[in-house]
Image (spheres, grey):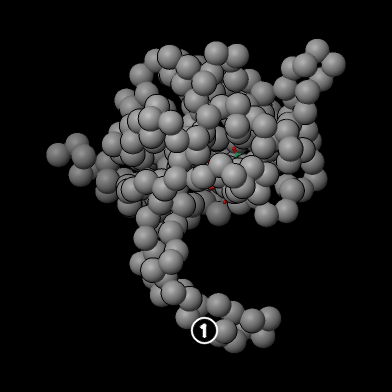
Amino acid sequence: DGLAVIVVAAGSGTRLGYGMPKALVPVAGRPILEIALESVARAAPGADIIVTVPAGDSGLSDVAAAHGARPVTGGATRAQSVACGLAALGSDSRFVLVHDAARCLVPTRVTSAVVAALASGERAVVPVLPVTDTVRGVDAQGHSTGTVDRSGLRAVQTPQGFEAQLLVDVNLQAGLLERDEQGALTPVDRAEDPEGITDDASLIERFTPEVPVTFLAGDEESFKITRPFDLITARAVLEERAR
Ligand code: CTP
Ligand code: MG
């Protein structure tokens, strides 16, 4: 019903340090991508699911296809991988979610809430959590510049949800996507991302500041598997859910 999900899985997983793409690393015996696709499909049955995989991928495309998702080759950065996914969107996609494969344990409730917010008319939706650490600024010498008021901060998660046309438009404006002579969307290879792009919603704020970006409640279980310690947490969450 017009919902597409881009699951970005084209990263290399350098910080995890397994010598393979992070989304292929097993948690409790199953690749991170497989767990992520099951989490997404539970909340968005029937959605068109696109998975970005590394160039020259061995393995992730098979995992995607086995779960009814469409693999496409990603780009050099996360933002460029999202653009690769957008170029593969069907013309009937009204809404699109962008989700990190590395947030494989996202609860159904969160994804459902993002979809519901889009259905109720929000155009850009971001799940967030309060920041629990004390946060300080630092200068070039490594000295503290003072404590930042964390009550005014939120940590950003995925899936982020968008009106599909809006996310395509801001990717075109950012030079991450272009249209070929036939009018088809094609990703642009770039050495670096446009400045100031740290997540998908930041493109909206930069290029269409009149469109409000709406926050809703994220979840601790949507944490991103980044370093080896996170694998321990992920395994524990799966074990807890299986009890
Ligand atoms: N990603 C992607 N394409 C890239 C870089 C990242 O699709 N060129 C995806 C990753 O696969 C991941 C998500 O974006 O699901 C978040 O990125 P991150 O956690 O940084 O993963 P990696 O880039 O793989 O890890 P690292 O930075 O440690 O190499
Ligand atoms: Mg990365």
Is 238 situated above or below 43? below
Across and down, in percent, residue 136 comes to 50, 77
Q: Is residue 103 left or right of residue 139?
A: left
Instruction: Count numbered badges in the picture.
Output: 1
Three-letter residue code for mark 1: Gly
Q: Is residue 31 left or right of residue 236?
A: right
Across and down, in percent, residue 6 comes to 53, 29
Across and down, in percent, residue 140 comes to 68, 81
Q: Residue placed at 74% from the left, 17% from the top?
A: 184
Check disc 1: other Cα within 10 Å, few if <14, some if 14-19, many if 20+.
few
Is 57 situated above or below 92? below
- The residue at which mark 1 appears reads as 146
Q: Residue placed at 27% from the left, 41% from the top?
A: 238
Looking at the rendered structure, the secondary structure element under dot 1 is strand
Q: Quadrant of the C terminus?
A: top left
Q: Is any atom of residue 216 visible in this view?
A: yes
Ligand 1's image quarter is top right
- Nearest the viewer among 106 and 208 is 208
